[in-house]
Amino acid sequence: MSDDPSGPARPGERDREANRLGRRFQRYAQVGAGVGGVAARAAGARLFGLDKADERTARELKAALGGLKGPIMKVAQMIATIPEAVPAEFAAELSTLQSAAPPMGWPFVKRRMRAELGAGWEGLFGSFEREAAAAASLGQVHRATSREGQKLAVKLQYPDMQSAVDADLKQLGLIFSIHRRMDRAVDTREIYREIGERLREELDYLREAAHMRLYADIFSGDPRISVPQVTEDLTTQRLLTMSWLDGDPLLSFREHPLEARNRIAEAMFAAWWMPFSRYGVIHGDPHLGNYSVRKGDAEDTWGINLLDYGCIRVFPSAFVAGVVELYRALETDDRDRAAAAYENWGFRNLSVELIEVLNVWARFIYAPMLDNRVRSVADGISPGEYGRKEAFGVHKRLRELGPVTPPREFVFMDRAAIGLGSVFLHLGAELNFHALFNETIEAFDATELDKRQKAALKKAGVPLAA
């Protein structure tokens, strides 16, 4: 358009989103200066070990990472929720990192939109708000309307994110390498590979659109759970246009009556466990901003909007079977059955001692679902102390027995389970989690799950694993 100060789109602008060596070097310098400076000042104090790590050093690391827009913040949030990937002091600080970042200005947005939809892109919308409604680590969201008046959310990826991801993952590899030398409890190599693969997938908005179609199909018959609808002709690999779902922040319901909070928690439980037990997929990003709450049609009904489908993890049926088997093993205190379940998960070189250590953490994760009564997730334990005792004990024993290498599938399964528990803690929900869980797994059959998963992924257009 003639009033565009950024000028016409240049030839090959879309291609310049490809990974460029210069961009990577620039990012290495940005991230390395912050992380490397903290590491140099604290190397003598075993920065990435538990023995002498302190809160001040952890705050310095958070400050170094928090000043950077891009995937390094998302990586930091990820590893903060993976038990024992980093010391407790660091996890506490990194978990407070916000995904918010300064949004791109309007001239920049217009150039990016033209690169994805062409010079006449504004005419494809009824309206398009200049100010971003939300800005995160990989992109920002604008409110818009279709030409027919439907409310839309337009998610636009920041430029050069592929370069930033590769550079930030290089720095994460360095952090994990130092951590392995300082602390033998957990071998982080598979954690690193899993985070890298999931983060690179998040850059592909066509994949995210397919994930959205998958979840829309899964919950088409459940009025409690709403999924945005993709606007296919306004979506590209770096631009995702979808229906705007009105709702209120989940945390704004903490003071609502218990029954309302319980209904919201039940919907959250179904949104997480039903896709996993029936299709082998989970919504792997437990960030509270990825959910909003809406009033149901009836006076006493509540529903949730399930948002952001960049981090969806698809599991083989054998892994899902292992999760169900471990639950049954803990239920009956059957150590041999637990060992078989861990092997299904992908753990190797298991000893009797190591199985007992893993069971400590498993009993913590499964505790609400093993207890057949109405209760809160923490059951009287303060949120600040929830899981700390178990994590400390597990880490101490793993340092003696380790290193243990968590399989790749374990990483986001554990992260998402902890995130879901955090939602229940924030809501103060009191439910019979045992009954809810057993309802989701009562008809579990690995062969049927495998067939159902393949059919659902194919229908939604989700790329199948090689």
Image (tube, rainbow, N blue to C red):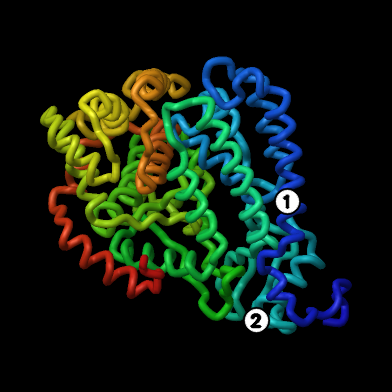
> In the image, what residue type sits under mark 2?
Leu
Classify mark 2: residues with Cα within 10 Å, few (<14), some (14-19) or many (20+). some
Residue closest to the eye, 280 or 183: 183
Q: Position of residue 418 (x, y in %)?
A: 40, 36
Q: Position of residue 160 (x, y in %)?
A: 70, 62
Residue closest to the eye, 374 or 415: 415
Describe the element under mark 1 as helix, strand or loop. helix
Residue closest to the eye, 430 or 188: 188
Q: Quadrant of the C terminus?
A: bottom left
Residue to which mark 1 is pinned: 27
Task: Identify the disc placed on residue 290.
Answer: none
- Residue drawn at x 29%, y 52% is 276
Q: Is residue 277 left or right of residue 75?
A: left
Q: Is residue 271 above or below residue 205?
A: above
Q: Is residue 368 visible?
A: no
- Residue drawn at x 54%, y 37% is 176
Q: Quadrant of the N terminus?
A: bottom right
Task: Decide which of tag 1 and tag 2 comes sooner along the chain.
Answer: 1
Q: Position of residue 217 (x, y in %)?
A: 33, 67
CA gap, disc 1 and disc 2: 35 Å
Q: Is residue 149 left or right of residue 258?
A: right
- Residue drawn at x 74%, y 53% is 25
Q: Is residue 347 left or right of residue 205?
A: left
Task: Identify the disc placed on residue 124.
Answer: 2
Q: Is residue 395 above or below residue 429?
A: above
Q: Is residue 106 above or below residue 60?
A: below
- Residue drawn at x 59%, y 19% is 53
Q: Is residue 332 visible?
A: yes
Residue closest to the eye, 134 or 166: 166
> In the image, what residue type sits under mark 1?
Arg
